[in-house]
Image: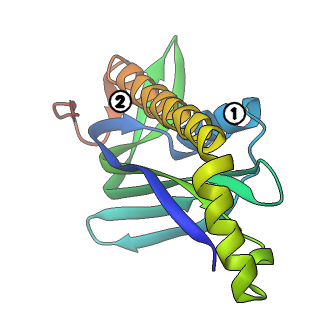
Amino acid sequence: MAETLTVVDGIKLEYEGLFDPKELYTVIDELFKQHSFDKHEFRNAELTHKEGKDLVMDLRPYKRLSDYLKTEIKIEIMATNLKHVEIKKKGLKKKMYKGHIDITFTAFIITDYEHAWETRPIYYLIRMLIDKFIYKGYTEQVKNEIITLTNECYDEVRSYLNMNRYIAEPITGDKGIDHMHM
């Protein structure tokens, strides 16, 4: 059975204000491309209702480090009560959304994800010994790297959202106070 070690357990980012979901997705996607991660879009849904729109995304970029070990970062994005807003940025009109967004970052290290060490009980025992004595240092190094990358992703997304706070006032739609909680 593959074992999953939770390395970063649910760092939350909360923001209310202007943003473009496509740009947010691009910020996340580009960061993981730079670090050679493959992407897996687990869920991407848009719900429309009277008050506006809700967006739900569950992104799971992952990287196979060997046939035995892989890392995965789960990014859950929940945007609620989104309303279309048109703004003026550098003299050009741009369409964006205004609403509330919650983002949660969770990082994992997954061992034996191909279930190669499960075929016989003796293999399982050997795997446990290898994990405990041989791969311990390597696993610790991978753990530190995935923590650093998760924090980098958090900072990139926070910077993107914070940057949108200083965009020109909306031309149409709600004119409210933008705020961000960390």
Is 21 placed above or below 54 here? above
Quarter that holds the C terminus: top left
| Picture colour scheme | rainbow
Q: Position of residue 82 (x, y in %)?
A: 34, 54
Within the image, what quadrant is residue 112 found in? bottom right
Side of 110 where 126 appears, left or right: right
User: For mark 1, what is the residue?
Assistant: 30
What's the residue at 70%, 54% (across, down)? 70
Q: Secondary structure at mark 1?
A: helix
For the N terminus, the image quarter is bottom right
The amino acid on which the numbered mark 1 sits, given as a three-letter code, is Glu
Crowding near pointer 1: few (<14 within 10 Å), some, many (20+)?
few
Dot 2 corresponds to which residue?
A: 171
Tag nearer the camera, 2 or 1: 1
Mark 2 and mark 1: Cα distance apart in space: 30 Å
Mark 2: which amino acid?
Ile
Position of residue 169 measured from the top left corner of the image (x, y, whole percent): 31, 22
In front of the other: 3 or 155: 3
Count of labels in the image: 2
Q: Name the disc covering residue 158, or none.
A: none
- Residue under the image location 54 percent in, 40 percent down: 143
Q: Is residue 45 above or below residue 76?
A: below
